[in-house]
Amino acid sequence: MKKIIVLALSLCICVGLMVTAFAAESNNNTCYSKEKKIVYKMSEKEVNEKLTEIGVPEDLINKMSRIMKEDIAQNTTEFISSELVTRGTIPSYDLEFYVNVYKTSDSSDGRERYKLYTFYRWLNIPFNRYQDPYGIAWDDSIWRAVPDTSYNLDKWKFTGESTWYYADDTALAYADDAGAGWNADLRSGIIDGLEGYSRITIEAQTPGSISGSSQLNANYSHVKSVGSVGLVFDTISVNFSGYASQDSQGIYKNFNY
């Protein structure tokens, strides 16, 4: 059965979304984290060497956001796969959206765990900037989300400045047994840089070593008008729900475990 999670899109800058992990309902009375200047903990040389060590291809390292590279370097143990999303009504020359899968430490009871990263970067800053829902779905007969492992970050740069600012959160905007979703907060103002990412950890439903191939579905919806927005999750599927005008990018991909 499909589960639909919908929220009302607000024009108020300070309105955000907070959902208790894996609850079916959301509320919209919580502000996003206060914007902060990005301070890096590792040199770019150090982080690139770490990513190379765990098997990330050089071309992917070169196009990754540096703050996301640090996150991956500190929280994963092996690169599994990455795929750039190129299907949908949003052209790839406007929006770059891709999915990364990484191995991480197993659970205390021996369940295999993987971190799923989704990344977006607007190559041409859109005219309409609200909150864009995006999410990722998995096969819940094999995987389940690990509670309290959600993280998402939006970063932006004002035109004429070199400093990047960001806001981050650990709350899920949308959640289901078969997937998780967030809102990309497309900041207003005169900006020439706009990107962000999210991550969540999934683990095997059963303890012990497992092997095979599994499918993921990722989808990004760009909202172009005021209205209700949300995500609907089905078996290995996540799609936009609501009556606001929107465009999207999305893909199904396989990864081996």
Image (cartoon, helix red, strand yellow):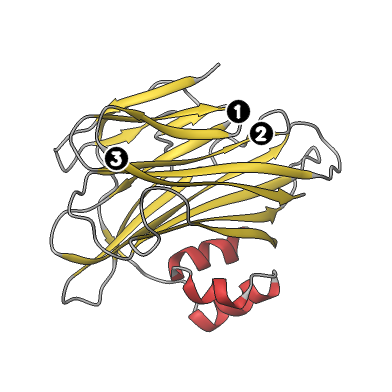
Q: Which label sits on residue 235?
A: 1
Does the CB distance between marks 3 and 1 fall below 8 Å? no
Residue at (37% x, 57% y) in the render: 91
212 on left or right of 37: right
Does the CB distance between marks 2 and 1 fall below 8 Å? yes
Residue 18 location (% of width, % of height): 35, 33
Q: Is residue 81 above or below residue 152?
A: below
> Does any portion of residue 62 appear in the rendered image?
yes
Q: Which label sits on residue 139?
A: 2
Seen as rendered, the residue at the extreme right is 209
Q: Which label sits on residue 100?
A: none
Residue at (37% x, 48% y) in the render: 89
Label 3 sits on what residue type?
Answer: Gln
For marks 3 and 1 on the same chain, the one whose residue lies earlier in the sequence: 1
92 on left or right of 204: left
Label 2 sits on what residue type?
Answer: Asp
67 on left or right of 167: right
> Does any portion of residue 21 appear in the rendered image?
no
Q: Look at the numbered disc 1 and give the secondary structure of its residue.
A: loop
For marks 2 and 3 on the same chain, the one whose residue lies earlier in the sequence: 2
Q: Which residue is mark 3?
A: 246
Residue at (22% x, 42% y) in the render: 224
Residue at (54% x, 53% y) in the render: 117
Label 1 sits on what residue type?
Answer: Thr
- Badge 2 local density, few (<14 within 10 Å), some, or many (20+)? some
Q: CA distance from mark 2 to mark 1?
A: 7 Å
